[in-house]
Image: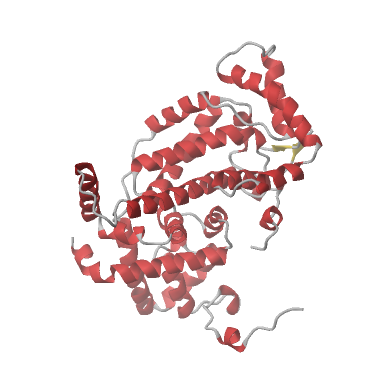
Amino acid sequence: MPQNKTPEHNQRKKRPERNDMPENTINMRRLQDLMDTYGANMGRWPHEERRLARLWFEQHPDEAQTLFTKAKELDQLLDTARPPETDISFLQARILKAASNTPQDIMTLSGVRAANDDVSRIGKTGTEKTGTEKTGALATWKSVAATLIMTTGIGIGIGQVAAADTTYESAEALLSISIQNDYDEFDLNGEGL
Amino acid sequence: MVGTHSASGSQIPQSPNRVDPDADILHGLARGRPGALNQLMERHLAAIKSSALYMLGDEMMAEDIAQEVFLRAWKQAPNWQPGKAKFSTWLHRVAKNLCYDRLRKKKEAYTDAVPDIVDRRPEALQTLAARELHSAQKTKIEHALDTLPERQLMAITLCHYRDMSQIEAAEIMEVGVRAYESLLARARKNLRDQLSRHKTELLDE
């Protein structure tokens, strides 16, 4: 049985949303709202509202100046906290080195196929080698395990992840699976958004 | 060639609006090619590190976060199948969650460093003095940003410092566009309220 909204809810002050105005119109209240939300740089505004905003500003230059001046103040202050760009080449090298010692995870059938493609290309994987060949050796073992998991259905796998802890690690694994399979958030934890 | 592959290996055509610009790189990454990881970093490492830096205000922490993001990308690339979100959105989401974790730990550590019973050991006093010195040296803007709730800080970071579109930022934050706009509006209001008494001083510097 749907709940009726209370009188208090209906009387709540509404922010001027885009959908409240007729098509191809914009007013000062909406422009103020955009300034308060995004600042004075119109490049950050919703794309569909920039043209209308420019037209309005051309017709109301004095009001436009007032709106922009106030919003620019905070933008300028925020810009003072912008740190300088730093060289990332050392960080890039560090990550590459760390990755060379990090095996890739293989959970899905496509991952198994990709790993098996590497394995068959490399050949026998009994010997311990570095880099891709080491990944290939790991992939062979994991491809068998992954195939067994896949035959019991990915839903059980997700359930097992969801039943674990609630750290960002497991949430991230769920997110990864959900993005891959286009699940919406409702499906993941059984609760509404 | 840009495209996606089903489990059977056949190519699935994607609508032009949904082609992931990193599709080719991901193809190589899934096969464990370090060159693909390098390409991915050339495209996104600076942005990821920059976002983490704005959130955390600490370069070493930001670099640790960035490293963790790309190592996770490396590890999980074989499992990636194109869906609704771009891979870069996933990268930013992982960075966002890692930043939230660090911010919470940072706040807990700061709270822990101010004991109820004064610890007069030299090393404890040195830590407290260092924190006070660091705090005094931070700009008022950074102080104001530090006081924002983490989701408002993330909204400001993505909009003002990363120049991301509303849709992309909302996807990264895993909220609707209206919810994202609400966070952004509240963040700017909170900053204006805090900074209003320092406004003249800062603009005259």
Rendering coords of residue B168 (x, y %): 55, 54
Q: How many marks?
A: 0
Could you say where residue A151 lies in the image, as x and y percent from the top left?
Answer: 81, 35
Q: Is residue B149 above or below residue A8?
A: above
Q: Residue at x 34, y 76 (%)?
A: A66
As rendered, which of B103 and B122 lies closer to the eye?
B122
Find residue A158 and report its image quarter: top right
Outermost residue, right side = A151
Which quadrant: the C terminus of chain A?
bottom right
Residue occupying the far front of the picture: B117
Across and down, in percent, residue A76 comes to 31, 61
* Rendered residue at 64%/22% (across/down): A138
Is A113 drawn above or below residue B92 in the view shown? above
In this rendering, would A28 be left or right of A116?
A: left
* Residue A159 visible in the current orientation: yes
Q: Quadrant of the N terminus of chain A?
A: bottom right
Name the residue located 46 percent from the left edge and 60 percent from the top edge. A44
Q: Nearer the viewer, residue B171 or B17?
A: B171
Q: Indicate whether A163 appears above or below A55.
A: above
